[in-house]
Each structure stands twice: as structure tokens, then as C-alpha cells.
């Protein structure tokens, strides 16, 4: 518009029509669409759409999804969030000018290009987190702030992650197993300088050896990240519960003495151990039975199966009832072989043969379906009265 008068006139006209926001980098003003300047946002060589959502006054969600055929792809289901659609959207954009400054709760989120950069600030202007992405390759760097870095789940370098790298590998082949235990990684990082970050997806490796942290995801996108601003540990952990849900409270007997059996030599030994505990007045609350494969002769036919080993449990329901009569809880050790457990309980089970999913040549496939695993698990738990499970290998 060439002069201020026509500009004012246009603003009055548009104001009388109404204003709105379009997700593709346009400003929708009634029936008019004004194209805003700016290039498309590209991360890891792909055009993306970025959504900024407010989960609470202290927590913002940043979702980066690749665009295919004009549409942003859906986030894969992981089951890690308390609800998949968390937060109220504060702003969405595909062009560099779309997200210059977005208010999300008490936080302000701004976007810069060259390289793509998302900065989260407190109301006083202090930077909570500074996320920098690679426009051509997978990767994200972020501020480490001051103080120790905590979190990332069980095992690995203890207490302070600063100065370390973590490939986030699940299992017992982890970092210094003899002192630091098995590895059960969770992409929840707490910076003691006043921030925390949960990388919901994808999974990747962390590097804290430099002045900034680095996260290398696989695949590169989509990315779904929650950033928390607080210096109070109780607030930080409450926000984590807001994201992933509150944990189930363990039963009181779970705090007692639990006796695990390595290998079994028949039903007489099963009941003999229980009688010995009671005769010697040992305060045992639960008996745990390992799976066959982790020991020569366990509760099931083989590791990963939910079929009772008849050599040890010829009448499992009545044997479990007899243990209950002696005031024991019964816990079974179980391993779901494979690298990925995917899907929902409500999905159809399509693995063959059902329900174990073992391939015709007797191997475990790398991908296991929850829909196939859960019915077998549930039948033993409900029908035979099992009180608890010891899930192994993360």
C-alpha cells in the first residue's frame, strides 16, 4: 500500500471483517488471505511444519512434522504420553515468518532461520532453552546451562551426565555394568540451572562433551519435544507427570522381602520353599519364578512364552491358590524378545503363529505387537491369579 491513509483504511476494513490464523504461513482476515513473506522451513533436508503448544504455564511442546503432499504427517503412536493430543496449540507455521514470536503459557517461543532455531524465554526475557536444528542433516543442539545434568533413565554415567555421551541403548551391555547397572534409557533430561526437556520422539543419542548439548535422532523427523521452565525439583517432576502421567503406586507387599528362585526341580520344590519360609518364620511377601532360558527349568516352557512348564507347574491354578493360602504373592519373570514393542492393545494381532509371534524357523522377530503380547499376558495373570510380573531386558 503506497501511503498511510490507504493502509489505515485497509486496516479498518479488515478489522470490521475479523481476523484469524492459517496454518500454512498465511494470515486469514475474514475472507481475505494475505501471504506473509518467508521461505519454507527446512530441517534435515525436508520441508516441515512446526506447532507450538502450551501444556501448562511452565511447559511448552514443540512438534516438528515433515510435509508430504501438502500435509504434515501424523506423529507415530508411542504410548509414552498420558494423552496423545497434549497441550493447546498457540501457533503453527511452515514458513520462516510464521513463528517469529508466539506466546505459550508464561513462556515466549521465537523462531529464527539460518540455521533453523527455536528459542524459549521466560517472562523476564531470560532464555530457558535454545534449540538449533540442522537444515540439511539430522541433529539438534541445545543449551546445557549451568550445573549438573540429571535424568536419562536408569543406568549409564551416574548423577551428572555432563561431559559424557549416551547412545541410549537398552539392555545389560551398557556403560560400566558392574557399578552402574543395566540401561533403561528415558529421554528426560533435567538441567539444574532451571530447565528440563523431554524428547518424546524420535529416539536418538546424546552428546554432552561440548559447550552445547547435541541430540542425533533416528529418524531425523518428526520431532516432538517438551521444554519445562522451573528451578524447583518438585515442579519439574510434576510437569514430567503432566506429560507422561502419574506412575502406578506399588502395592504394600512390593516393599517387603521377595524371594526369587533360580531354577526349579518340580512341584515339590515349589511348595517346599514356601513351607520352609513359613516354618522358619521368615517374613517373605512374594515368591518370584524365573522363565526357562534364563534358568534351566523355570515357570514357562521357554523364554518369551506364556505356557506353563508342566514339569514344575502341572496344575498352575491350584498351585498358585495354595501359595496364596500361605499368604504369598506370586510373581513371574518374563521377557518379550525383540527390539521394538509397537501398537496398541486394541489393535488386531497379525503375527503368525499366534500368540507368541515366533517365526517358522524358531526365531523371535525384531518387532513385536502389543496386541499379540497382551492377550497371552492377561490370560495367565487373570485366569491363574498371578499377582505381579518381572519384565526383563527393558
Image (tube, grey):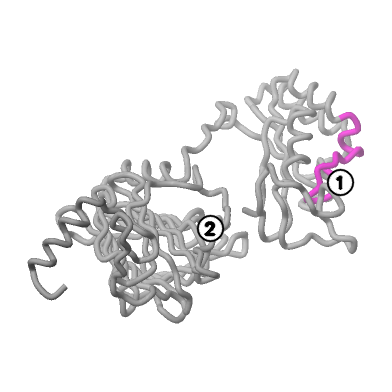
What's the residue at 62%, 59% (across, down)?
A: 171
Task: Kindly identify the residue that appears in the image at 85 percent across and 41 percent down.
Answer: 307
Give the left or right position of residue 114, taking residue 12 as reference: right
263 vs 175, nearest the viewer: 175
Residue placed under numbered mark 1 in the picture: 301
Tell me: residue 20, above or below residue 215: above
Span shown in magenta = 300-315
Name the spot of residue 388 as percent of width and height, x first. Answer: 67, 34
- Residue beneath the point at 71% across and 26% down: 277
Confirm whether residue 350 shows in the render. Answer: yes
Q: Is residue 281 left or right of residue 124?
A: right
Residue at disc 1, secondary structure: loop
The quadrant of the image that shows the N terminus is bottom left
The x and y percentages for residue 311 are 91, 39
Residues packed near mark 1 inside 10 Å, few (<14), some (14 to 19) or many (20 plus): some
Q: Nearer the viewer, residue 135 or 153?
A: 135
In the displayed structure image, the side of residue 65 where residue 98 appears, left or right: left
What secondary structure is found at the residue carrying circle 2?
loop
Q: Residues within 10 Å of mark 2 (few under 14, many from 20)?
A: some
Residue 374 at x, y = what percent? 72, 42
On whether residue 306 falls in the magenta region, the answer is: yes
In the rendered image, which residue does mark 2 sit on?
75
Residue 329: horizontal and vertical position, in percent?
Answer: 69, 27
Residue 393 vs residue 178: left or right?
Answer: right
Judge whether residue 23 is colored magenta.
Answer: no
Q: Is residue 24 above or below residue 326?
A: below
Amino acid at each position: 500500500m503506497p501511503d498511510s491513509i490507504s493502509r489505515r483504511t485497509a486496516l479498518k476494513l479488515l478489522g470490521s471483517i475479523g481476523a484469524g490464523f492459517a496454518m500454512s504461513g498465511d494470515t486469514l482476515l475474514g475472507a481475505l488471505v494475505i501471504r506473509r513473506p518467508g521461505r519454507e522451513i527446512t530441517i534435515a533436508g525436508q520441508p516441515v511444519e512446526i506447532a507450538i503448544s502450551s501444556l501448562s504455564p511452565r511447559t511448552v511442546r514443540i512438534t516438528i512434522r515433515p510435509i508430504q503432499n501438502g500435509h504434515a504427517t501424523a506423529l507415530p503412536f508411542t504410548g509414552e504420553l498420558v494423552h496423545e493430543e497434549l497441550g493447546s496449540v498457540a501457533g503453527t507455521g511452515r514458513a520462516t515468518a510464521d513463528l517469529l514470536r508466539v506466546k505459550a503459557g508464561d513462556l515466549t517461543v521465537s523462531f529464527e532461520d539460518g540455521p533453523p532455531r527455536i528459542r524459549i524465554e521466560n517472562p523476564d526475557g531470560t532464555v530457558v532453552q535454545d534449540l538449533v536444528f540442522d537444515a540439511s542433516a539430522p541433529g539438534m543442539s541445545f543449551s546445557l546451562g549451568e550445573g549438573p545434568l540429571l535424568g536419562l533413565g536408569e543406568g549409564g554415567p551416574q548423577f551428572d551426565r555432563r561431559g559424557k555421551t549416551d547412545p541410549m541403548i537398552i539392555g545389560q551391555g551398557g556403560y560400566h555394568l558392574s557399578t552402574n547397572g543395566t540401561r533403561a534409557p528415558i529421554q528426560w533430561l533435567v538441567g539444574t540451572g532451571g530447565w528440563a526437556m523431554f524428547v518424546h520422539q524420535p529416539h536418538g543419542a546424546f552428546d554432552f562433551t561440548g559447550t552445547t548439548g547435541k541430540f542425533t535422532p533416528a529418524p531425523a523427523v518428526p520431532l516432538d519435544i517438551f521444554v519445562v521452565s522451573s528451578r524447583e525439583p518438585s515442579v519439574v517432576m510434576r510437569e514430567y507427570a503432566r506429560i507422561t502421567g502419574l506412575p502406578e503406586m506399588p502395592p504394600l507387599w512390593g516393599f517387603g522381602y521377595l524371594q526369587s528362585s533360580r531354577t526349579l526341580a518340580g512341584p515339590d520344590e515349589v511348595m517346599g520353599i514356601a513351607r520352609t519360609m513359613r516354618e522358619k518364620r521368615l517374613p517373605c511377601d512374594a515368591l518370584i519364578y524365573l522363565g526357562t532360558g534364563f534358568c534351566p527349568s523355570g515357570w514357562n516352557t521357554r523364554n518369551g512364552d506364556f505356557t506353563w512348564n508342566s514339569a514344575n507347574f502341572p496344575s498352575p491354578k491350584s498351585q498358585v491358590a495354595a501359595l496364596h493360602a500361605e499368604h504369598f504373592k506370586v510373581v513371574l519373570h518374563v521377557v518379550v524378545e525383540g527390539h521394538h514393542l509397537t501398537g496398541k492393545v486394541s489393535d488386531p494381532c497379525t503375527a503368525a503363529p499366534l500368540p507368541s509371534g515366533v517365526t517358522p524357523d524358531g526365531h523371535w522377530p525384531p518387532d513385536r505387537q502389543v496386541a499379540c503380547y497382551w492377550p497371552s499376558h492377561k490370560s495367565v495373570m487373570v485366569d491363574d491369579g498371578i499377582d505381579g510380573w518381572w519384565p526383563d531386558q527393558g
